[in-house]
Amino acid sequence: MSKYSRDPVTVRVPATSANLGPGFDSLGLSLSIYDEVTARVVDARPGRTRVTVEGEGADTLPSTEDHLVAHSLRVAAEALGGHPPSVELHCRNAIPQARGLGSSSAAIVAGVSLAAHLMTQITPDPARLLAIASRIEGHPDNVAPCLLGGFTVAWSDGDAARAVSREVVSGLSPVVYVPDGHGFTVIARKALPKSVSHADAAFNVSRAALAVCAFTTDASLLLEATDDRLHQTYRAASMPHTAALVTQLRDEGIPAMISGAGPSVLAFTPDPPVYPGFELRKLTVGQGARRIDPRLAPQVLPSG
């Protein structure tokens, strides 16, 4: 029987924005909107899971083992060599749900991190947790910045997900425009063509490479570096207001892009304009997943 902590464990996980324009399924950024999840093991043996939610998704998310945090905790416990325990979970959500800001990745990383910290014989290893979280999510572009913090480049090496995190250049001012409507990754992916021209592929390779320089060394390159021909044009029809806002911001010289699969818009400016139909949030670059200790609040997973 696996050994689990008798004390409650709380983790704090950030919102994320994936793609960042040209870096489809590879580039990501953590943002300073956080969900906090507390887990308490009520029985080391498998059993019922009870979930309570406050904040975002309180009226829509499941309160049973179908909740993504609970599912991810179970999968991670098994992957780490244990048996899923009976747990009580309390989620305090601030990340908007289904808006392209990584709410599902945050839930996955929270569940995986909780499993590692509840299992007393496990030392949390970011690479191992990234692999588990990526298998649950299906791709690493959101879970990487959620787990590691900062600006990340993620890729798959065979079946293994890998990622590196770098500190973001100083002076970067991210803002997000969050619409009322929801977005769904599955629908957004169906809008993509099965192939693109060699010219468009080459264009995106150059911009993705430039984006690494822009986010880590020279923010003045961001407008050019966040241009894209691989996915945003094809998704525009399903989110016309989002696409129009991206175009308008870029026409004004503001680096802007669809955040993840949308419909939120991520932009970079210290003085953002306000647009009707979108909630504006000024943010900073976020830290990676952390366990919260009420006395010391030590960082147990790297943030960059």
Image (spheres, rainbow, N blue to C red):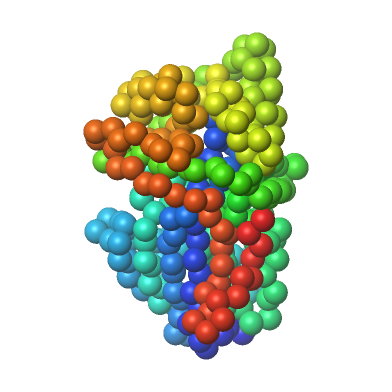
- Residue at 56% of width from left, 85% of height from top? 5
Name the quadrant of the N terminus: bottom right
Q: Is residue 84 visible to the viewer in this orientation of the structure?
A: no
Q: Residue 69 location in percent, x, y?
A: 46, 63
Quadrant in the picture for residue 95: bottom left
- The picture quadrant where one finds residue 149 is bottom right
Residue at the spot 75% in from the left edge and 42% down from the top edge: 157
The x and y percentages for residue 53 are: 32, 66
Q: Is residue 121 above or below residue 218?
A: below
Residue 296 appears at what percent x and percent y? 56, 81
Image mark count: 0
- Residue nearer the viewer, 195 or 205: 205
State whether residue 137 is above or below residue 114.
Answer: above
Q: Residue at x 61, y 46 (%)?
A: 170
Residue 209 can be seen in this image: yes
Q: Nearer the viewer, residue 193 or 36?
A: 36
What residue is at 64 percent from the left and 17 percent from the top? 203
Q: Quadrant of residue 84?
A: bottom right
Residue 192 vs 29, above or below: the answer is above
Quadrant occupied by the C terminus: bottom right
Among all residues in the image, which is located at the extreme bottom?
A: 6
User: Is 137 above or below relative to 195?
Assistant: below
Can you give x and y, in whole percent of width and height, for residue 12 in the image?
49, 66
In-image side of 18 versus 236 (left or right): right
Q: Could you tell whether 281 is left or right of 59 in the image?
A: right
